[in-house]
Amino acid sequence: MTKMDRHYFHPHQQAGRGIFKIYIGMSAGVGKSYRMLQEAHNLLRKGVNVQIGFIETHGRPETAALLEGLPVVPRREAFYKGKLLQEMDLSAILLLAPDWVVVDELAHSNIPGSRNEKRWQDVMDLLQAGINVISAVNIQHMESIHQQVKAITGVEVQERVPDSMLQIANEVVNIDLTADELITRLQEGKIYDKNKVETALRNFFQPAKILQLRELALREVASQVERKVETEVPRNKQLRHERFLACVSTNDATARQVIRKTARLAAYYHGEWFALYVQTPRESAGRIKLADQRHLINNLKLAAELGAEVIRVQSSQVAEAIMETAREKEITTVCIGRPHIGLFDIILRTNVFSRLLKALSVHQTDLVILS
């Protein structure tokens, strides 16, 4: 593969910038470095100019064995506080200008005095130079969720990566294991030395902690895939993402039922939901009964507590207000309470429901009447 055709695989790639692929995992030991080295071997077999810029085997024999036969860029050595340390040689990689380079430990902090403070900044330099990069990071190193990670693990992660690194990536791949599989790998000595296993099991490697970190990793990758779908797949070919609209009235019992059932529907479909109250002139502040106003406030508060975005609109045209909100929020399902009189009677007496049904059908929006 030549420099001219390396961008063939990614038609949406920014001109002149390298392709960026990140392997992400819930913790050390899931197999990110192993997978990167496997990919490097695959590229090498295809005749691609690939270099190992930096890989951290952590003394794991399986990972170290995969380095055999791969071209490795020698590390740069530097003294810091009387110790001889090794770093990735960014200048050497830029000079070699390979098609692909493997750069492990994206969250790593470089030795003071290095060209960049952080390794993710080194990766940015490589990408800007047109070099494709394969890298890896654990979910706990992402900047926006480090407080969540601290709450889960009790550890303040010092080395962090800005979320923008995931957002600019062409591919984010989750290396996933169950909590039991990861703990088994730990007990077999495949992650740390045997003498560190018991300490790890008592601290970080507890099933409840691993499970929550796994959830964070899966969510992050799902969000990245969603962003790619939105930018690369035509809207008429995208999967439908459910968004629910609960229409709340001043009738206390009906409103509570609509709110709770809509919340359950949204949770089941993993969708967003909204609670809409349309205030008509007869329900204005000076005319609404105090009891109704109190119930309304409590019900809208309940909706917010259950995860809804609460919307209040003043209008004498209830159907039009619902339709406008449904269009604006790209609602897929409108949920309303069962009318106090027969639906057939309402349609005969007014054209509110017929107009609503017609407008919603145009936008392929479902209408659910909740009992």
Image (spheres, rainbow, N blue to C red):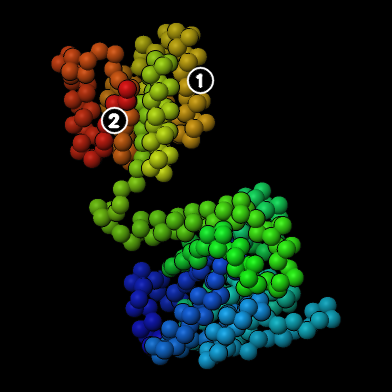
Q: Nearer the viewer, residue 174 or 121?
A: 174
* Residue 215: % across, % down: 53, 53
Q: Nearer the viewer, residue 188 or 308?
A: 188
Rendered view: 241 above or below 248: below
Rendered view: 15 above or below 343: below
Horizontally, is 137 left or right of 99 in the view? Answer: right
Q: Nearer the viewer, residue 127 or 99?
A: 99
* Residue 186: % across, % down: 63, 67
Q: Nearer the viewer, mark 1 or mark 2?
A: 2
Q: Is residue 128 visible?
A: no
Q: Nearer the viewer, residue 248 or 41?
A: 41
Which of the image's four quarters has the C terminus?
Answer: top left
Q: Which mark is residue 298?
A: 1
* Residue 362: % across, % down: 20, 38
- Mark 2 sits on what residue? 368
* Residue 284: % across, % down: 41, 13
Horizontally, is 221 left or right of 59 in the view? Answer: left
Q: Is residue 38 visible?
A: yes
